[in-house]
Amino acid sequence: MDRKNDGLRLMDGAGYKKIIIACDSYKGCLSSREVNEAIASGVKEWNADDASPEIITLEMSDGGEGMLDAFLSAMKGERVRIHAHDALMRWIEAEYGIVDDTAIIEIAQTAGLALIEPEQRNPMKATSWGVGEMIMNAYRRGVRHFIVGLGGSATSDCGIGMLKAMGDDWKKIRQECSFVLASDVTNPLCGENGAAHVFAPQKGADAKMVQMLDDRARKFAEVSAKHFGYDRSEAPGAGAAGGLGYAFLQYFNAEARPGAELLLDEIGFDALIQNADLVITGEGHSDRQTLMGKLPQRILEHVTNQKIWLVSGGVSDRKAMLDAGFYRVVQVTPEEMPLDEAMKPEVARNNIIKAIREQFAL
């Protein structure tokens, strides 16, 4: 029998007619869309006959990198480009989205760590001012509802910069607007599990800075609690994005939701996979943290009657992934390949296509 010509019908003895591909970005390498397209190319190269399955690709994000693109793709919105400031108060061009009267704000567009050169990173100086500029721009356009992705920040200023950028308008925004936070971070604002201790070292803070940042956050929370008569500093997610989560929760009564779940709801994921035979998800690197609320695990929770593959750049604990319920776990990067080589976009794309072809040939 000619395995190539028989294509997908031979794999696992099943005839796959509809495949859903919904991967997160391979951060610093390929976007969600590029990963999905590479996997789809691998499927098509293997199954090049007339019985090719229907393939649906879905841009994904958990609220971090690529959040704006994923939500605009799902919600068919308008992209708005503005001049704003990055975390070091340098002028940049930033984007946000508008869908009807809802703005899609990816805070990394202005306050993103990726915008700051490694030698310039300093959370003692970094500000969320640019986030306030994006919100004010949308507010002046008539937007009253906001979905805010809190991933990838360079800041640890508890949202003070954002509030300062709004001036006295924050009071009107508090009364007139609603905010939903897209984030998988559940850390409180202060303490050993808070924004400074857990995340600031990744943003350039040494041990002394960490303690100073934590003290500053605690003082800000105390002053804010006296003003409002309540304290959200211990709320899950307050520590997200260097305390930006706290500012939204405390000052704007925001609702925090897992970013991946929010996006899956928006695209009607459960309905899309109803008659699918196979769901493929993945991320840049999968390990035990994947099973603690990252996008692949969120998708796994929605998949019941379909087979689900995990296709990631690297995999640290294959057994844990299989035990969790993934039908197949695929590492696309060859073990002998250096990381800097694997991170090259064209190399990563070719690795994905090759790995998918080989999986369908099993």
Image (cartoon, rainbow, N blue to C red):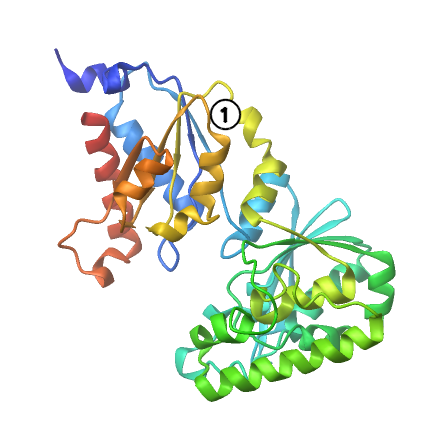
- Residue in view at x 44 percent, y 76 percent: 201
Q: Is residue 337 left or right of residue 243?
A: left
Name the quadrant containing residue 188: bottom right
Give the quadrant of the N terminus: top left
Question: Residue 143, can we see it?
Answer: yes
Judge whether 145 appears above or below 228 on screen: above
241 vs 48, nearest the viewer = 241
- Residue in view at x 32 percent, y 36 percent: 323
Question: Residue 125, can we see it?
Answer: no
Give the quadrant of the C terminus: top left
Indicate the position of residue 297 as horizontal and vertical percent values: 44, 42
Q: Residue furthest bottom?
A: 208
Indicate the position of residue 219 as horizontal and vertical percent values: 69, 82
Indicate the position of residue 157 as horizontal and vertical percent values: 62, 77
Judge whether 240 appears above or below 313 on screen: below
Q: Which residue is mark 1?
A: 273
* Amino acid tagged 1: Ile
Q: Is residue 143 left or right of residue 356?
A: right
Name the quadrant containing residue 170: bottom right
Name the quadrant containing residue 57: top left
